Image (cartoon, rainbow, N blue to C red):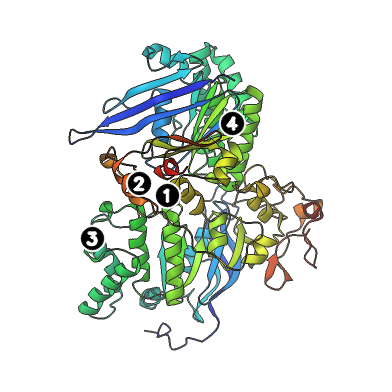
Amino acid sequence: MTALLEVNGLSVEFDLKDGTVSRVINDLNFSLTAGQTLGIVGESGCGKSMTALAIMGLVPMPPGRVADGVIALAGEDLLGASESRRREVRGNDVSMIFQEPMTSLNPVYTIGDQIGETVRLHQGLSRRDARERAVDMLRAVSIPAPEKRVDEYPHQLSGGMRQRVMIAMALACQPQVLIADEPTTALDVTVQAQIFDLLKELQEQTSSAIILITHDMGAIAEMAQRVVVMYAGRKVEEALVDEMLTNPKHPYTRGLIACVPHLEAKPSEERKVLTEIPGVVPSVAELGRGGCPFAPRCAEAMDRCHDEMPPEIIAAHDHKVACWMHVMAP
Amino acid sequence: MLDACDGAVMTDTENLLEVRDLKVHFPLPKTNPFASAPKVHAVDGVSFDTKRGTTFGLVGESGSGKTTTALAIMRLAPITDGSIRLNGEEICLLAGEPLRQQRRHMQIIFQDPYSSLNPRLRAGEIVRAPLDQLDVGDEKIRDDRVAELFRLVGLRPEQQALFPHQFSGGQRQRVGIARALATQPDLIVCDEPVSALDVAIQAQILNLLRRLQEEFGLTYLFISHDLGVVQHMCDDIAVMYLGQVIEHADRLSLFGRPLHPYTNALLSAVPSADPALRDRADRIRVSGDPPSPIDLPPGCRFASRCPFAEDRCRAEEPRLRLIAEGHQVRCHLVTDDGSPPPHLAA
C-alpha cells in the first residue's frame, strides 16, 4: 500500500537565547498508510510532541523553524504549501488531540460551538447544521444525552468527557491522519480503556491513520501496529510492535521496556529490583554534540559511541536501529 | 498540657497504624433552607491495619477518596468520625502542640516535586526545615543529619546549596524524600510519588524507596493509580470506590485472584505489553463515570457501572465480608467460599 503520510529527513531547529541553534528534531523518517496506527515513544524532551507540531504546521516560529525535510500527505508536499493551504489541511485532513483536555478547550464557548467551528470553517456548514453535526459527533464518542451536553461549557464535564470532546472535535471533519499526543495521560485507567476502544472503533469506520504519541509501552502494544522510538530528537529504533517488544535492539528501548513494573496476572513472591536508566534526557543546549546522544546514559557504550553518530541499519526484517553494537555484529 | 504525645503509651504491637471506620464528609452550602445541608462523602467508613515495615497500597480512580484518606491520617483533612491509632496512640483527637509533636512520626512525599518544594529555599534548608520546626537535636546534629540524608537519597553534598529549579524532576523528588525522612518517622505517606516523573526516572525513585524501607524498616502508605507500580511496591492493598474499601487483600491474592467486579475492571483496563494478558477473553470494561459522592445511590455504589449488577445490588448495600484469610470484599455476588461472581468465573 502506498504511504498516506510521509516524513522524510525532517529537521526542526530552535534559536536559543545565547545565539546558538539547537536541532531538536534531527533527520527523522517514517511513513504510515491509511488505517494504520503508528506509535511514537520516548521520554519527555525527546521531540515527540515537536514532531506532531511539525506535521500540523504549528512549530512556533520564531524561535523555531523546520530546517529541512519533506512532509507529504497523499503525495502533496505540506512544507512547501502556502499558509492558506495549510489552514485548509489543518483540522480537516490532519487533526490533533492535545495532551491536556483541561487547558486545550476554550472555557468561554460551549462545546457545541467549539466542535461546530471546525465544520463551519472547513465544510461551510450553517450554524444550525454545525450544531447538528456536533450532536452527532458527541453521540459518536458516546457522551450521554448529547442534545443536552452540546450546550454545556467545558467546566461542566469530567476529565474523561472533556477528552471525548477533544476527540469529537478532532474527528468532526473525518481527517485522514489523526495525531493523538498523550491522549490519556491525565485520565484514569478505566477511562483510558474507553478512549482507546473508541479510537479503534472510529478508526475502523473511517480508516484514518493514527499517530499515537506516548511513553507507555503498554498503550503502544494495545493500540499500534508499528512503533518508532525517539531519543534526543532522533529515531533510534523502528519496528512492528510485537517485534519491538519481544526483540528490542537499542539499549534505550530495552531500558524503556524494563524500567516499568509491568502488571502480571500471576505475581510471584519475589520482587526484582527495577532496571534503571541512569541520568536524564539531554537539554536542548546539549543537543548536537558528536557521538550517539544516548552514549552518556548507556551501560554498553564503547569509545566509538562517544565520538561518532551511529548510522541507521536494518537489524532484522522490517526492523531498523541506530546503534554501533548492531553495526559491529556480523 | 496533657502528655498524651509523650510516647509513654506506646504499645509494642505488630500494627503501626490502625484505622477504624474513618469518615471525612465535606459539607456543602444549603440549597433548601428546610433540608439538611448536602455533603460530599469523600471517605465513608474506611478501616484497615498496616503492619510495621510493610507497604500498604490504596488504589482507585480519581475521586475514590484515597488521597483524602491519607490526608486524614496525616491530620491534614478534617475528620468527621472514626479512629486512627499510630503506634497504639489515638491521634484523631490530638490538637495543638501534642499534634505538632506527633507529626515527627508521620511524614508525606507529595505527587508533584515541582510545586511541593519552596522555590526560595535551598535544598539543604528544605530538608532541614522539619528538624528546625520540631527542635530535633542541636545545630551540629542537624547539619550532620542533613548531610547524611543527602547521601542516603543519592544526592551530592554540594547540592545542598542549590535551589529547587536547579534540579531535574527525579532529583527534586529525592529532595522531597530526604525531607520526609528527616525526623526519622515511622510512617511515610507516598501520594503518587512517581506519577509526575518520566518513565525512566520512576524506576530510580521506586528502587530508592524500596532500599530505604529495607534499611530503616519504614512503613509506607502508598497511593497510586498505576497498578503495575502498586503490584511492585505494596504488600497489602485496599481498592477504594466512592469513599469505601471494596476489596482488601494481600498482594498475591488481590492480583492473583481478584474477586470484586470493579477490581477486575481496573486490572482489565491496564494496557499491557504482554500479549497473553492483552488477549484474555475475560477482560471486562466499565462504562461511564462514577456516581456523585453527594447523592449516593441506595444499593452498591458500583452497581450503576457493574456489568453483573442484579436487582439486589441496586437496593441493598453490601457489607465488607471476610472471604478468606486476609481477603475482604464488598459484593453481594461473591459467594462465602470465595468464588467470584458467576459471570466472571465463566
Residue farthest to the left?
A: A18
Which residue is at 28% across, 77% downward? Answer: B135
Q: Mark 2 points at which residue?
A: A281
Are labels 4 and 3 on one chain?
no
Q: Name the residue under label 3.
A: B122
**How would you rate the neighbour count of disc 2 (Cα within 10 Å): few for under 14, some for 14-19, many for 20 or more?**
many
Report x, y in % for residue B173: 37, 58
Amino acid type of the residue tagged 3 in the rendering = Arg
Which residue is at 43% across, 89% downward? Answer: B8
Q: Mark 4 points at which residue?
A: A149
Amino acid type of the residue tagged 2 in the rendering = Val
Which residue is at 33% across, 57% downward? Answer: B171
Report x, y in % for residue A238: 49, 36
Q: Give the mark toward the camera: 1 or 2.
A: 2
Confirm whether residue B6 shows in the render. yes
Report x, y in % for residue A43: 42, 44
Quadrant of the rendering where the N terminus of chain B is positioned: bottom left
Q: Mark 1 points at which residue?
A: B198
Q: How far apart are marks 1 and 2 (CA)?
A: 10 Å
* Mark 1–mark 2 CB contact (< 8 Å): yes
Amino acid type of the residue tagged 1 in the rendering = Asp
Are labels 1 and 4 on one chain?
no
Q: How far apart are marks 3 and 1 (CA)?
A: 24 Å
